Image (cartoon, rainbow, N blue to C red):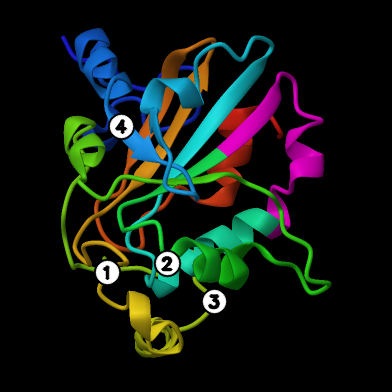
Amino acid sequence: MATTSGEHGRGKHEPQYELPTAETLREAGDLIVKDEKGNEVLFKSLYEDRSGSQNLTIFIRHYFCGSCEDYIRTISQELPPSLLSSSTPRTNLTIIGCGDVTPIPSWRTRTMHNILGADTGFPVYTDPSRKLYAKLGMLSSMSTGDSTPSYVKQGPVKTALLSMKAAMMDPTNVFSGGSPSQLGGEMLFVEGEVVWFKRMRHAQDHAEVAELKEVLGLQ
């Protein structure tokens, strides 16, 4: 029988919250992701051996997705490191994309710098092969869904235009941002075990910040 996200957050009976089996997580943990410098590390190194803390991993879509950029900007404002470090247990936040390494610096500047130019410092990794996304059962779709989440700050047309603008401002990486149909999701690990997982069903289906705060015990 499949296990779904239980005491940690909502949606415990919905398919998108189904937890990976222990075997799937073992296999996923041995897959390789790259850090911002292109160094290869095992996925499991991002959440294992961090006693006394919980680890939230956010899988975004491609590096030119306007709604994902809105999401990470919202996360940076509403879940800053100062707040996450004060949670019980302390929370580490990691972001994973599906493009090449080269677009990450400009993407970081667009999403994680505040008005004073300070960077949140959240580590970013990438899975250009998308093997990890596939192993964890993440979907592919170009649908934007029927409603607009609170983290999206403009309408669909402007979001698309901002995505195009971001790509045009970084022309050398326009084809390196990752698959435009790949969806992501959010995972919470406690003591090396995944206790909560939400897969996106469409391009604007990241977990709302209020849900993340509930899951992390910040409400």
Q: Amino acid at mark 3?
A: Lys
State the residue position of label 2: 103
**Where, quadrant-wise, is the N terminus in this rendering?**
top left
- The residue depicted at 44 percent of the width and 18 percent of the height is 195
**Front label number (4 vs 1):** 4
Q: Is residue 75 visible?
A: yes
Residues drawn in magenta:
77-93
State the residue position of label 4: 32
Nearest to N terminus: mark 2 or mark 1: 2
In magenta segment, residue 211: no
| Tag 2 secondary structure | loop
Nearest to N terminus: mark 1 or mark 3: 1
Asked if marks 4 and 3 touch (Cβ < 8 Å), the reply is: no
Asked if marks 4 and 1 touch (Cβ < 8 Å), the reply is: no
- The residue depicted at 26 percent of the width and 23 percent of the height is 28
- The residue depicted at 40 percent of the width and 21 percent of the height is 44
Q: Depth check: 22 or 174 in front? A: 174
**Where, quadrant-wise, is the C terminus in this rendering?**
top right
Picture layout, residue 158 above or below residue 83: below
Q: Quadrant of residue 164?
A: bottom left
Q: Quadrant of residue 143?
A: bottom left
State the residue position of label 1: 144
Instruction: Report the side of 35 relative to 111 (left or right).
Output: left
Q: Depth check: 43 or 143 in front? A: 43
Q: Amino acid at mark 4?
A: Ile
Q: CA distance from mark 4 to mark 1?
A: 29 Å
Instruction: Report the side of 142 relative to 50 (left or right).
Output: left
- The residue depicted at 58 percent of the width and 49 percent of the height is 209
Asked if marks 4 and 2 touch (Cβ < 8 Å), the reply is: no
Nearest to N terminus: mark 4 or mark 1: 4
